[in-house]
Amino acid sequence: MSVDTASFLGKVREQLDRIESTQGPAIDRAAGLIAASLRKDGVLQVFGTGHSEALAMELAGRAGGLIPTNKLALRDLIILGGEDAALLADPKAERDPQLARRVWDLAPIGPADVLVIASQSGGNGSTVEMAQIARENGHPLIAITSLEHSQRITSRHPSGKRLFELADVVIDNAAPHGDAVLDLPNGGKVCAVSSIGNAVIAQLIVAGVTARLLAEDVEPPIYLSANIAEGDAHNDVWEARYEGRIRRSAY
């Protein structure tokens, strides 16, 4: 296959078709868990490291998304926990399980909350540790991962577990082992697709949750864009209901 824009778009279409044809039941179960949590005044907690943090940003605090959402990130240790920035100077810090424990301890997590964890490989220490903590504390856990990739790797967590082995619901983002999809002439691949699949899955979950709430005549807690005239007023009222439980900042 050529390295060109048409080839890449073809691969993306294949990925999205696979998500549509195979992941509907899992996405439906995930939406059901989150809707049930929101009815109990729960919050959706979302965690990802590296490029999987984009999934957390897709679900937490964006226009057209659910308001009771909270993004968990390794940088919380510095911004909220007062740690030295050197803690995350190592690009492989996401492999350290103990960082997840410290992020969890800083998080405003309530008993009715649901966890979504995204990871392409599903095998880094902080990812698996966060999943284990969620299970230990009785929170429903939704994983968004690449099963093709994860099933071919050895976990970096001391338990030997991978994310998909710990979750209540596993959603496959249909990205390949290694993430990139177009072959280079001398080996290797270019153009990754996991973030594309993750973003689509995130919005499918939001649609599913919203549909459930509307069917029950419950007003969905949805953000308006802060860049339209009525956005701030609408959002401020809703955010006040979750004061101290969702964190919004510029970082």
Image (cartoon, grey):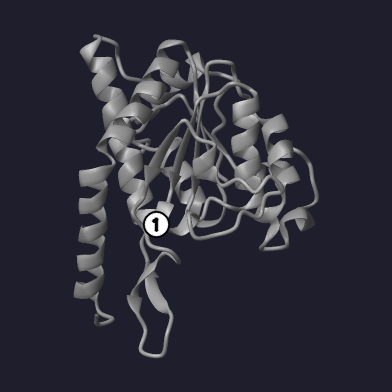
Q: Nearer the viewer, residue 134 or 207?
A: 134
Tell me residue 127's x, y (percent).
Answer: 60, 45
Judged left or right of residue 251, residue 230 is left
Crowdedness of circle 1 by 10 Å Cα count: few (<14), some, many (20+)? Answer: many
Q: Is residue 54 above or below residue 206?
A: below
Q: Nearer the viewer, residue 160 or 134?
A: 160
Question: Relative to residue 108, is residue 36 depicted above or below?
Answer: above
Side (left or right) of 70 relative to 2? right
Taking the spot 49% from the left edge, 17% from the top edge, the residue there is: 42
Total numbered circles:
1
Residue at the image position 65 percent from the left and 26 percent from the top: 136
Q: Quadrant of the N terminus?
A: bottom left
Residue 63, image x, y percentages: 35, 36
Q: Residue 201 at what x, y percent from top left?
A: 33, 43
Q: Residue 229: in sight, yes or no?
A: no
Residue 187 or residue 227, whichever sits in front? 187
- The residue where tag 1 is placed is 194
Evaluate whether residue 113 shows in this view. Answer: yes
For the residue labelled by badge 1, is the local secondary structure a helix, a strand or a loop?
helix
- Report whether 180 appears left or right of 126: left
Residue at the image position 36 percent from the left and 89 percent from the top? 185
Q: x and y percent of residue 74 in the render?
A: 65, 46
Q: Amino acid at mark 1?
A: Ser
Question: Image quadrant of residue 169?
Answer: top left
